[in-house]
Image (cartoon, rainbow, N blue to C red):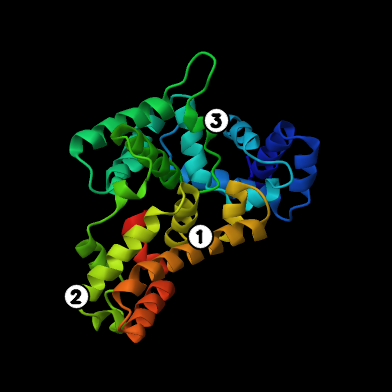
Amino acid sequence: MSDEQRTGSLAALLRAYVSPEQRAELEAEEGFEALLDRHVEAARTQWPALSLPAETFVRHLARHLPVGRAAEVMRILQGPDLYLACACTSGDPAALKGFEQHILRHVPARLGKVSPPLVEEVLQMLRERLLVGSSNTPPRIASYGGRGPLRTWVSIIAARIASELMGQDERHQLVAEPPEELARMLAPSDPEYALLREDARQLLVESLRKAVAVLSEQERTLLRLHHFHGFTMDRLTLMYGGSRSGVARKVADAREQLLERVRMELAPRMKQDQLALESLLGLVSSRLDISLLGLLD
């Protein structure tokens, strides 16, 4: 089959599985057929051992294209990740092995300082919740839509499971680094940070930790996805729904709330040195992605 025939065939399959509204939206997208072909080729290249028919994958993809945003999702789609998830849904042994080796093995590092027995329990529950279905319900991994990295999606679920097991409601307690470790990560090459006294560094880290503690789970997730994983406002909008401006406002509000809480924590303890206080706040604001690395990831 020529490249042109293959591209047309895949596009025809997708058109057959979407609604008329979605079909019109996709056909209005310039280069839609070639884009679909690239997603499939990238998936097959990354997972050559999977025996997943193209028709099965395209049908799975169609279920995750929202009406009104089908073309947008196609542009940001994590094709290889969705391909792996689809194959796991059907119980492909090679896919389950790939999920174990390329996704689950990264989960322990995302949980932070938790005990090995707890890590093993989290991994086992992840396998059961994500990969085991019933006669009436497909495995939960079928709900992954490919709008963000599969590893991030799984890690968020893993952190929630760990919270349940530990009887905690606040995710940051599971993934927060000790102050001395976060201090080393906080802009270590920044000359301004290098000039801070050790007690000021510790104070800054402790204030950040307390500030993160009062954020809601959604606020922490938005800040983590935007500042650490680099999700754009467009991608966050696709994940959360609503308008782009609304999601951007939520991210900005969470950031402002965090910085204000840091100021409230620092101000009483640095009331004699306003210049140092403003320096610390400026450092956190300008390097927020690094400052939150150990607290939100």
Q: Earlier in the sequence, mark 3 or mark 1?
A: 3
Q: Amino acid at mark 2?
A: Glu
Quarter of the image where one finds residue 207: bottom left
Q: Secondary structure at mark 1?
A: helix
Residue 71 horizontal/vertical position (percent): 69, 49
Residue 12 horizontal/vertical position (percent): 72, 37
Q: Earlier in the sequence, mark 3 or mark 2?
A: 3
Q: Earlier in the sequence, mark 2 or mark 1?
A: 2
**Relative depth, front residue between 142 and 279:** 279
Horizontal side of residue 124 vs 72, given as left or right: left
**Relative depth, front residue between 39 and 178:** 178
Residue 205 horizontal/vertical position (percent): 29, 66
The residue labelled by disc 1 is 254
- Vertical comparison of 142 with 152: above or below: above
**Relative depth, front residue between 149 and 180:** 180
The residue labelled by disc 3 is 53
The residue labelled by disc 2 is 198
